[in-house]
């Protein structure tokens, strides 16, 4: 991206502050274009003929360094690539690595359906959201085009997730594409041997395609050839080898490609990258060992620029580290993860239920909420606006204060003396130093809870309800 500040973007906008985009000023709209929370098309004036030249220029200047490729259709569409930086602290990484878990065409039908459903239904609640997986990769193991097409049809009937078609045989790929061409699947893969036939498929069916070669010169040549044919929705697979020197070389190829695309501006290879941790299963025959090394490979290439990967193990001990690491890497490091401040109900609180204070840092809030709900503690949980900072740091930095606690209840229209019979607040143990201030400012009784929300059940048994003074 050649523009990286709202001021630079502002020069190309109409500069009339009409607010039709929903922002008060063009400068504010420019900031949203930089962080991609809004699209250029959200500015009606720039779409007029009067600003057509600026619109075209701005489109080019805002385009990401790595091409964004879209796989699938409808509500489950998945974008990959689209990054502008090598290190996420420079801006952020945008489209999280897409996880495609495999099925294969020699599976018994019911086993195939069960595995697809398991992939589609995977959910892990974490910090206020569900971590999910993204795609189903269908491998042609039989070598039979009709059998492959039949498996693809069954998968398409079972899930709406995007699909990856995996075969080096253009005949098999064509048969499968006839079944799911409307779903915009990703085709894997074109090589130096089959590129001509696969390129024809990509043109005719208008689908994105993966180019595979561990030789970067050949990979670059393949990309240039496809571009000359007008095929631009490309994904590059430089090979994922699971052991020793070859693993080191795989790692180096990913780094070289991403640096060349962003730092050196080599647009002919500035495409999303595919890694295949599933290859660990070609080396390790024991399921636990293979799952372990697959997770290791996934972790390495999530961190080092893989935009999409094909995986196999559906065991929780493999999937959970993968989805959690991806979430960590693709969380914007410049912006604290926070929840809306306010007073929320946990369970079914009554006037005798406790009122517990925490901050609006999402990890803190949901940890406390989970500990309370899992122990069936009915209460009111107040999330104080600390700009998404945890309790201890917020107390030290002045983001958690008696005034802010009082303001939280005022904005929520929650009058404690009317809503409860005890007129008592419970501060977290790490905020004990605020007890006197909170009592003075609110006029309420303040109790100090444990420093760790996991200890709240034991604390409640000893201290709740509060003794009358």
Image (cartoon, rainbow, N blue to C red):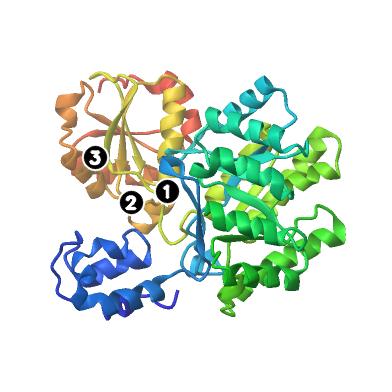
Q: State the separation of the CA atoms marked 2 and 1.
A: 8 Å
Q: How crowded is mark 1: few (under 14 residues within 10 Å), some or many (20 or more)?
A: many
**Residue 344 location (% of width, % of height):** 29, 32
> Which of the two residues, 334 or 109, is positioned nearer the viewer here?
109
Q: Which of marks 3 and 2 is nearer the N terminus?
A: 2
Residue at which label 3 appears: 439
Q: What element carries label 3?
A: helix
Instruction: State which quarter of the image contains the N terminus.
Output: bottom left
Is there any visible trace of residue 100 in the rendered image?
Answer: no
The answer to whether the residues at label 2 and label 1 have Cβ atoms under 8 Å apart is yes
Secondary structure of the residue carrying numbered label 1: loop
Residue 193 drawn above or below residue 118: below
Front position among marks 3 and 2: 2
Q: Give the residue at x 74% y 44%.
A: 278
Query: At 69% across and 61% down in the image, what residue appears?
Result: 196
| Mark 3 → mark 2, Cα distance in angstroms | 19 Å
Q: Could you say which quadrant of the image residue 115 lies in?
A: top right
Instruction: Name the residue that disc number 2 marks.
Output: 386
Nearer mark to the viewer, of 3 and 1: 1
Left or right, residue 364 beside residue 416: right
Q: Which residue is drawn at 33% across and 56% down?
A: 398
Q: Mark 1 points at which residue?
A: 390
């Amino acid at each position: 991206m050649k523009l990286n500040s709202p001021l630079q973007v502002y020069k190309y906008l109409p500069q009339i502050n009409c607010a039709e985009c929903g922002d008060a000023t063009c400068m504010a709209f420019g900031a949203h274009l930089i962080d991609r929370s809004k699209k250029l098309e959200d500015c009606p004036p720039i779409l007029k003929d009067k600003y057509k030249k600026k619109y075209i220029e701005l489109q080019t200047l805002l385009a990401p360094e790595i091409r964004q490729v879209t796989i699938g259709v409808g509500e489950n569409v998945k974008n990959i690539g689209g990054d502008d930086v090598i290190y996420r602290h420079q801006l952020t990484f945008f489209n999280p690595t897409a996880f495609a878990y495999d099925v294969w065409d020699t599976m018994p039908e019911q086993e195939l359906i069960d595995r697809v459903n398991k992939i589609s239904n995977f959910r892990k609640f974490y910090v206020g959201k569900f971590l999910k997986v993204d795609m189903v990769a269908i491998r042609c193991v039989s070598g039979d085009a009709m059998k492959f097409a039949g498996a693809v049809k069954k998968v398409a009937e079972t899930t709406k997730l995007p699909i990856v078609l995996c075969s080096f045989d253009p005949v098999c790929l064509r048969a499968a594409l006839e079944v799911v061409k409307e779903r915009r699947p990703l085709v894997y893969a074109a090589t130096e041997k089959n590129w001509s036939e696969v390129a024809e498929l990509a043109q005719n069916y208008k689908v994105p395609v993966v180019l595979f070669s561990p030789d970067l010169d050949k990979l670059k040549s393949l990309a240039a050839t496809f571009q000359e044919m007008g095929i631009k929705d490309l994904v590059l697979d430089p090979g994922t080898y699971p052991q020793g020197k070859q693993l080191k070389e795989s790692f180096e190829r990913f780094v070289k490609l991403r640096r060349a695309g962003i730092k050196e501006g080599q647009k002919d290879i500035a495409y999303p990258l595919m890694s295949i941790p599933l290859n660990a299963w070609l080396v390790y025959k024991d399921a636990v060992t293979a799952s372990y090394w697959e997770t290791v490979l996934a972790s390495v290439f999530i961190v080092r620029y893989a935009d999409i990967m094909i995986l196999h193990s559906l065991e929780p001990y493999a999937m959970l580290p993968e989805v959690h690491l991806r979430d960590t890497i693709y969380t914007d490091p410049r912006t604290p993860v926070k929840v809306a401040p306010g007073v929320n109900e946990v369970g079914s609180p009554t006037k005798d239920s406790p009122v517990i204070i925490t901050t609006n840092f999402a990890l803190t809030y949901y940890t406390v909420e989970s500990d309370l709900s899992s122990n069936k503690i009915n209460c009111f949980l107040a999330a104080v606006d600390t700009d998404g900072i945890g309790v201890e740091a917020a107390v030290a930095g002045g983001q958690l204060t008696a005034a802010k606690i009082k303001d939280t209840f005022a904005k929520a229209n929650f009058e404690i003396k009317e809503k409860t019979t005890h007129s008592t607040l419970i501060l977290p143990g790490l905020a004990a130093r605020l007890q006197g201030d909170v009592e003075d400012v609110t006029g309420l009784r303040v109790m100090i809870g444990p420093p760790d929300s996991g200890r709240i059940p034991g604390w409640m048994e000893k201290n709740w309800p509060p003794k009358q003074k």
